[in-house]
Image: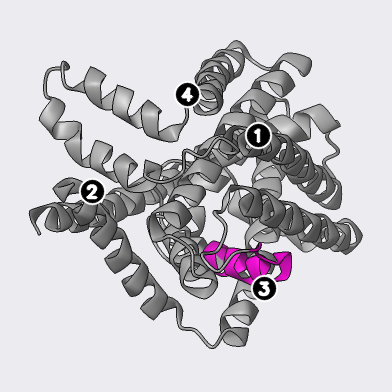
């Protein structure tokens, strides 16, 4: 019970912290750019590239659904899960990330797929965490490669290099060692660190998701997931490239890839729902570092944010209606299921 209370407090602290970070990011953006000029650039955007963006985004959703299916466990009834049953659940999760704080869409989709497909709850939650880790690690490597190609400022190259090294190390450890042993090894190391009790809630949370996902075939699935992630990030860069053309600020593909990568890495920070503020600050700052003027850089950031969030959120809303579900109720039930897993692990 005490651990569940701690989780609820952690969630509240994360939400408040995210709101403050978003407000600070928005303030920095507003202070640095002429918003009227930015609005004029947006009003003159060419819609043709944006139509192509919708097709690119649809392909991304399909690939991300395939990737998640690779990492999901088999249903207890046997057989596999049809891709058409995964897509709406994934979209509902993305909708949750857009309108709810603290990335609540992630536990929502894990809970929903476990309920619909009769999956082990721990493995379903674990698949989402594993997917996020592999996705972010792949993105860090892609960002570093793009930074080197475009000869980005040294601070960008250094930051992406550190992220790429860390991401590669984590991915290799997941493939070679496995999630469960990795968590147990982390526990043994953390036990000898001063103040270890403070990170115990984090380790318990990792236990929640590492349990039951150490099958031998998992290594091959992780490698395949990383390859798909790389393809998805190329498509994400294509979206930024098309949006840049729409607002009259052509970018070369490598620059678009770097802006997209740094922006997504920036949204890993706690923020308000929909990554408001952090997305714009990361995209606009990176674009300016690559030589784009402040006004078109912000216009690029705002329009790219709209194109990468709104179509998927709308599709998620349609999926929610099709499954006759309510997002608020799913969020409550998912949080309860997550707490129950944590309580089971802490007592084991």
Q: Is residue 342 magenta?
A: no
**What's the mark number on residue 177?**
4
Residue marked by disc 3: 315
How far apart are the alpha carbons under marks 2 and 3? Answer: 35 Å
**Residue in the picture at 74% in, 52% down:** 63
The residues tagged by marks 2 and 1 sit, at their Cα atoms, a distance apart of 27 Å
Badge 3: few (under 14), some or many (20 or more) residues near its Cα, within 10 Å?
some
Residue 277 in view, yes or no: no
**For the view shown, which residue lies furthest in the left direction?**
2
Is 84 magenta? The answer is: yes
- How much space separates mark 1 and mark 3, taking CA atoms? 31 Å
SS type, badge 1: helix
Q: Which residue is mark 1?
A: 220
In the rendered image, is residue 321 in sight?
Answer: yes
Q: Which residues are magenta?
A: 79-94
| Residues marked 4 and 3 touching at CB (< 8 Å) | no
Helix, strand or loop under label 2: helix
> In whole angstroms, how far apart are the C-alphas of marks 4 and 3?
37 Å
Question: Is residue 233 or residue 65 the one in the foreground?
Answer: 65
Q: What count of labels does the image hold? A: 4
Sequence-wise, which precedes: disc 2 or disc 3?
A: 3
Q: Where is residue 125 drawn, in percent x and y?
A: 43, 54
Residue closer to the observer: 145 or 157:
145
- Classify 10 Å Cα crowding around label 2: few (below 14), some (14-19), many (20 and above): some
**According to the image, label 2 marks what residue?**
345
Give left or right: position of 320 versus 250: left
The majority secondary structure of the magenta stretch comes to helix
């Amino acid at each position: 019970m005490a651990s569940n209370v701690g989780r609820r407090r952690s969630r509240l602290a994360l939400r408040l912290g995210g709101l403050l970070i978003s407000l600070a990011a928005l303030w920095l953006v507003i202070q640095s750019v002429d918003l009227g000029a930015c609005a004029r650039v947006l009003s003159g955007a060419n819609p043709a590239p944006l139509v192509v963006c919708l097709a690119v985004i649809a392909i991304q959703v399909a690939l991300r659904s395939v990737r998640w299916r690779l990492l999901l466990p088999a249903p207890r009834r046997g057989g596999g899960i049809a891709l058409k049953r995964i897509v709406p659940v994934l979209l509902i999760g993305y909708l949750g990330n857009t309108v709810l704080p603290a990335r609540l869409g992630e536990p929502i989709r894990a809970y929903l797929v476990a309920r619909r497909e009769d999956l082990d709850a721990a493995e379903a939650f674990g698949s989402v965490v594993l997917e996020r880790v592999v996705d972010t690690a792949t993105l860090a490597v892609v960002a570093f490669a793009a930074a080197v190609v475009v000869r980005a400022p040294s601070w960008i190259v250094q930051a992406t290099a550190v992220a790429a090294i860390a991401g590669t190390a984590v991915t290799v450890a997941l493939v070679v060692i496995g999630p469960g042993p990795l968590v147990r090894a982390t526990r043994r190391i953390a036990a000898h660190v001063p103040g270890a009790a403070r990170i115990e809630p984090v380790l318990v949370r990792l236990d929640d998701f590492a349990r039951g996902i150490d099958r031998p075939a998992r290594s091959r699935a992780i490698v395949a997931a990383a390859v798909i992630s790389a393809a998805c990030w190329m498509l994400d860069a294509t979206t930024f490239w098309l949006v840049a053309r729409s607002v009259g600020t052509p970018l070369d593909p490598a620059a678009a890839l770097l802006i997209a990568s740094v922006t997504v890495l920036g949204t890993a920070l706690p923020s308000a729902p929909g990554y408001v503020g952090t997305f714009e600050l990361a995209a606009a700052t990176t674009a300016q570092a690559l030589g784009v003027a402040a006004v078109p850089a912000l216009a690029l950031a705002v329009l790219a944010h709209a194109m990468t969030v709104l179509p998927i959120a709308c599709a998620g809303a349609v999926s929610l209606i099709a499954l006759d579900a309510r997002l608020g109720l799913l969020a409550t039930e998912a949080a309860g299921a997550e707490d129950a897993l944590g309580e089971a692990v802490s007592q084991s």
